[in-house]
Image: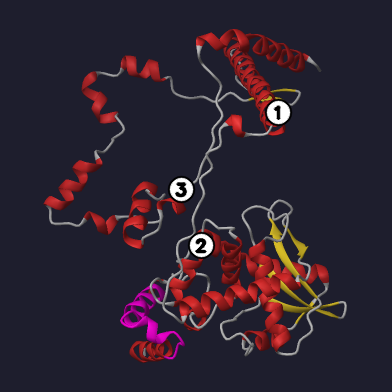
Amino acid sequence: MVHEDYARGLAALQRLPQAARCEGRAEAWLTALFEREARGALGSGLSLAQHLRRLAGFGASEIGVLVAERRGQYQPFATAREVVARKLLWAEPPPDNPHLRRGTTLEPLVRGEFLRLSGATRRPDLARRVEGAAAPWPWMQATPDDLIVLQGRLGVVDYKAPAAPLRDVSLEYACQLHQIGLLARAVGLSVTFRALVAWNSETWSPEVLPCPHDPVLEQELVAAGDHYWNAHVLAGELPPWPAVERLDLALADLPQEAKSEIEALATRWLRLDILAKEAHAMGEETRAGLVERCRALGLGQNVASGAVKITPKPTWDREAIEARLPDAQRAAFARPQWDLDTLLQQVRDLGGDPERARITGGPLELEAAARWLVAERGLPEARLRLTEYRATLSRRQADQPRLQPIRADAGTAVFQFGATP
């Protein structure tokens, strides 16, 4: 069966309109996808057949990258070059990641709650028509999450489960909804509204974000798809990496309004940070005094004083035990700690393979991963960099006289606040 599936997959690759531009790469690409399927890690929640179909065009979830790049708005997680590279079999589909798994897992919940609360009716028959549409643009594809009827009106909705609540419809999502709308129009459907239905993890409920119809965006979308399909995919040419302008403004280059805003925010953060530190120090000092007082009185039962609960917890006195334990017995009771390098070498000496015990899925070694992407995938290093800013307070002795009055004010404010019933 695997051999038959492989043969069918290879035949599908050979029927692609860009097949002549993928010579010598189809077998390796398909083998890699079969291996990923066996591991259950195909990516994007799609089947192998869906991945094969997506090679024949740009899906609704991809078109936003192309439109954004044509506008000069580059996204950190994808570029037009990478999208085209996947169509030419230079790269496999993106692998699974926590964000994709979260979306796949929560989509049934988002859909179910939205339909229950809105009273909308699903039209999967219409969604299938859109998915199989023969559009005027041969590259255009979409697999709608839902076409629904709400209060007699037909609409397109896409379900999202973001890590943080969404506040608006981004360009990427607007392009996705508009591409589905264009395909719906191609099969004779009249779509009257478009919307994201995004899960809000804070309220544990779906939120509807309308996406107004934008004919200009539709034109941009078609132009971007035509350009990258004809000039790059069908021509077998990868588009260039987008240039990334590095921010390197000096404070003197900023307008006075921006300088004043930064100064005001810096001052506010300074005062609040010192206030928080003084409050923490006073809180810890007071808590320690409370605990010590209870210990001195020998309290042996729970005590409630208003909202504060004091719970005695018998434990071992480490100093008393260590002072009385003979040296000859100390090793017998010492908690073992292991030298990982020594253990690995012992496994190798005995003919074992330590790699078989490796647990994957831990934090990435970012430096090594980035260098590999630069060397093996040709990604410009600038695509993998970002600028972070960290605010800290000066510890220079010369700056302490400036901080001391603020620290005193903060200490007084915290003391008065803590003393108020």
Quadrant in which residue 4 is drawn: bottom left
**Which segment did they paint magenta?**
15-37
- Location of mark 3 (residue): 385
200 relative to 337, above or below: below
In terms of secondary structure, what is the magenta stretch mainly? helix
Q: Secondary structure at mark 3?
A: loop
Label 1: how many Cα within 10 Å (few below 14, some 14–19, many 20+):
few
On screen, residue 223 versus residue 57, left or right, reads right
The foreground one among 233 and 373 is: 233
Numbered disc in front, either 3 or 1: 1
Image quadrant containing the N terminus: bottom left
Identify the element where label 1 is drawn: helix
Q: Is residue 179 left or right of residue 121?
A: left
Is 25 magenta? The answer is yes
At x 33%, y 50%, the residue is 368
- Does residue 372 lie above or below 233 as drawn? above
